[in-house]
């Protein structure tokens, strides 16, 4: 799976969980500041990412992710 394919999947997940238009979700959008994800949203994103990509997300590593690109890199590293 390419980085772009991972990004598109994550964009879809984020749009659904955060109730935002996918068009505003860019690779460098700050999940907390720009997309207004709170701690519950971040936990839901981590769980949905685990389910979609069949991997385990380390909580401390997940907390360090600020942008969707950070999450793409985490997923790619785990795959």
Image: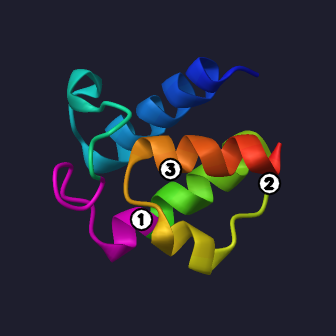
Residue visible at 39% across and 42% down? 14
- In this rendering, position of residue 26 left or right of residue 5: left
Instruction: Quadrant for residue 62, please give it.
Output: bottom right
- Give the distance between the C-alpha atoms of the residues marked 1 and 3, in whole angstroms: 13 Å
Kindly identify the residue that appears in the image at 58 percent across and 51 percent down: 48
Up-down relation of residue 69 to residue 38 (above or below): above
Q: Sequence order check: which comes first, mark 1 or mark 3? A: 1
Q: Position of residue 47 (x, y in %)?
A: 60, 60
For label 3, the crowd category at 10 Å Cα-Cα, with few meaning under 14, some 14 to 19 and many 20 or more, is: some
Q: Residue at x 21, y 49 (%)?
A: 35
| Residue on which disc 1 sits | 42
Q: Position of residue 32 (x, y in %)?
A: 25, 61
Q: Residue at x 44, y 30 (%)?
A: 12
| Image quadrant occupied by the N terminus | top right
User: Quick check: 63 above or below 55?
Assistant: below
- Which residue is tagged 2? 55
Q: Secondary structure at mark 2?
A: loop
The magenta stretch spans which residues?
31-42
Q: Secondary structure at mark 3?
A: helix
Horizontal placement of 21 versus 79: left or right? left
Which residue matches tag 3? 70
Q: Indicate how the structure is coloured in the image.
A: rainbow
Q: Quadrant of the C terminus?
A: top right
Give the residue at the far bottom of this rendering: 60
């Amino acid at each position: 799976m390419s980085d772009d394919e991972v990004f598109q999947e994550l964009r879809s997940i984020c749009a659904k969980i955060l109730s935002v238009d996918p068009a505003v979700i860019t690779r460098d959008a700050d999940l907390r500041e720009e997309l207004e994800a709170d701690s519950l949203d971040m936990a839901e994103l981590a769980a949905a990412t685990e389910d979609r990509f069949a991997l385990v997300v380390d909580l401390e590593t997940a907390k360090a992710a600020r942008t969707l690109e950070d999450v793409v890199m985490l997923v790619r590293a785990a795959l």
